[in-house]
Image: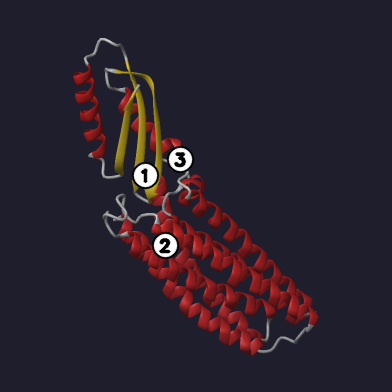
Amino acid sequence: MAEGSTSRTVIVAVIANLGISVAKIVAALLTGSASMWAEAAHSVADTGNEVLLFIGLRKSEKGPDADRPFGYGQERYFWAFLAALGIFLVGGTLSIGEGIRSLLLPEPVESLWVGVGVLVVAAGFEAYSWHTARKELKQAAAERQRTISEHLAKASDPSATTVFLEDTAALVGLAVALIALLLHAWTGWAAWDAIGSVLIGVLLIAVAFLLARRSKALLLEEAAPDDVVDPIRRRVSSEDWVAEPATVHAVYMGPTHLLVNIRATPRNDDIPAADLIARSSRLRKELLADPSIAQVTLTLE
């Protein structure tokens, strides 16, 4: 169910942003608005990024093989990192560049209400995509007993997080573009439009930084958060032959697969070695029965 809802979230985002991109490009051509061009670049970047996320989703579904004994789950982190770079390069820098160009070569706004209409309709599509991503995040956060903000910082699946943050930035960017467009038309001062374009670019770069930082942490095998590791630690410590506290480390090998390393000390030295091996082997098999655990290394000290 989680994989299906994630795919649906990404597909909804691709379809919404593709339609919005075309509408914004047409509106930018008609109005000559720098903020509208910035929003057009934003939506083109978002569309491409969500295609990258979808590629990552598909590639990560491959099971383990001789080349990747723990599966291809980390493909999702790599493609999410590329998507973050896309937001920065295509969306952020182009928007700032268009704002600077508009400051140097100001142009009057034409077909004002076409631009306003496109921005309002785009906000409706973006809001639906944002609602879909937020619904998935809220469900995942509730399963982990986290708030949405905590889940955004700790989530092991970057796909829904990326869509949610992109759509949040898109809604804020649309509001900025609409205000800048109206101010430009009412005051006749083209700098409003240019300032709006630069602000949209800065917003996109900030979102790109947050997403790239999270994807980097997952790619470099950041330790799984305490609310993921603690249940495993409690399970190990519940064994009557294990002295507390047992040392448990876990990293994500994909959005739903953990690599777990345990160092445990027997309660006393009177337990025969063969018995210890049998007990530790049983514990390891019980942990591996959890579908979220891909591998367990258990070391006795």
Of residues 298 and 81, the one nearer the viewer is 298
Q: Where is residue 294 in the image (x, y as percent from the top left)?
A: 30, 44
Q: Which mark is residue 223?
A: 3
Q: Residues within 10 Å of mark 3 (few under 14, many from 20)?
A: some
User: Which disc is residue 4 wearing?
Assistant: none
Q: Which label's residue is closer to the chain start, 1 or 2?
A: 2
Decide which of tag 1 and tag 3 comes sooner along the chain: 1
Residue found at x 50% / y 44%: 150
| Alpha carbon distance from label 3 to label 2 | 29 Å
User: Which of the numbered marks, if any, corresponds to residue 132?
Assistant: 2
Residue matched to label 1: 143
Q: Could you say where residue 77 lies in the image, as x and y percent from the top left?
A: 44, 56
Q: Residue at x 32, y 35 (%)?
A: 297
Q: What residue type is labelled 1?
A: Glu
Name the image quarter holding residue 16: bottom left
Residue 34 is situated, as x and y percent measured from the top left of the image, at 69, 79
Disc 3 residue type (three-letter): Ala
Quadrant position of the C terminus in the picture: top left
Q: How many numbered discs? A: 3
Q: In this view, does 294 lie to the left or right of 11?
A: left
Kind of residue at badge 2: Thr
- What quarter of the picture does the N terminus occupy? bottom left
Element at badge 3?
loop
Residue 104, above or below 151: below
Please determine whether, in this image, residue 26 is positioned above or below residue 269: below
Mark 3 or 2: in front is 3
